[in-house]
Image (cartoon, rainbow, N blue to C red):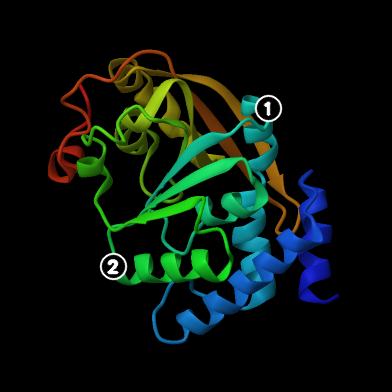
Amino acid sequence: MDVMTSIAEKAKLVNVDLTAEQVEVLEIYLKELAAFNEHTNLVSNADASVVIDNHILDSLTLVPVIQRLCEERESGLIDIGSGAGFPGLILAVACPYLNVTLVESIGKKCNFLQACAESMSVESRVQVFNERAEELAHGRDFRESFEFATARAVGNVEMISEFCVPFLRSGGYLLAQKSRAQLAEVDPARAALQILGGHVEEIIDIVNPATEKDFALVLIKKVKSTPAKYPRSFGQIKKSGIK
């Protein structure tokens, strides 16, 4: 099975129908990633089949949830700690109604993301910021401005909530991807979420059919404005939880 067929067929297994053009764009992404990974480590294994199974499909599992929540209306999504572009850059391809903001503190990774967005011809809907999320969240142009937020492998539920919830407008959603074992983080985070202005609306069981990896999507809804003091500095976030 060639790469393009593999992407299209596996996407269908997570209820995502990609057009031929979208598949071609993802193939461009795979080539860009493989080339960049030769000199700068973005993923542990840049082999196309591994990236499709472990990263692209994990990202695409969010698409049906986003479609259900926004009914494909034009929406903004912010991806914190974008790294190699999972899930934010992949969602920009799969969801043409999304305007995606990628936030990454490491300059080399930002260079990759910007170059990819241009090569993939999605730069009109993708912005890349070489910033720390906890600082950007206090900016007037970003605070409480997005319908969706994601943060893959950034921290526990309470930590990513402090990073992400301030970016969400009322009624927006944080989509937190977690392993089944990491769901133990949810209950300890509920009190902090209440302070931040969010609450856990739903926990969705998800299976990646390519890897048979069982995980969950913690859906956190923004229900009221976040107090101005949050997010705190990274040092404070690491040192202590919200009380």
The residue type indicated by label 2 comes to: Gly
Above or below — where is 209 with respect to 110?
above
Real-space CA distance between mark 1 and mark 2, rounded to the nearest whole angstrom: 34 Å
Please tell me how crowded label 2 is: few (under 14), some (14-19), or many (20+) other residues with Cα within 10 Å.
few
Query: What residue would you read off at disc 1?
Result: 71
* Quadrant where the C terminus is found in the figure: top left
Q: Residue 66 location, x and y as percent?
A: 62, 34
Query: What residue would you read off at disc 2?
Result: 107
Above or below — where is 105 with respect to 80?
below
Query: Residue at the location (48% across, 46% down)?
Result: 100
Residue 228 is labelled as none
Residue furthest to the bottom in view is 38
Query: Residue at the location (58% across, 34% down)?
Result: 74
- Confirm whether residue 46 shows in the render: no
Above or below — where is 64 with respect to 221?
below
- SS label for mark 2: helix
* Quadrant where the N terminus is found in the figure: bottom right
Given residues 205 and 162, the one toward you in this image is 162
- SS label for mark 1: loop
Query: Residue at the location (55% across, 80% down)?
Result: 34
The residue type indicated by label 1 comes to: Glu
Q: Residue 24 location, x and y as percent?
A: 72, 68
Image quarter of residue 234: top left
Q: Is residue 124 left or right of residue 109?
A: right
Decide which of tag 1 and tag 2 comes sooner along the chain: 1
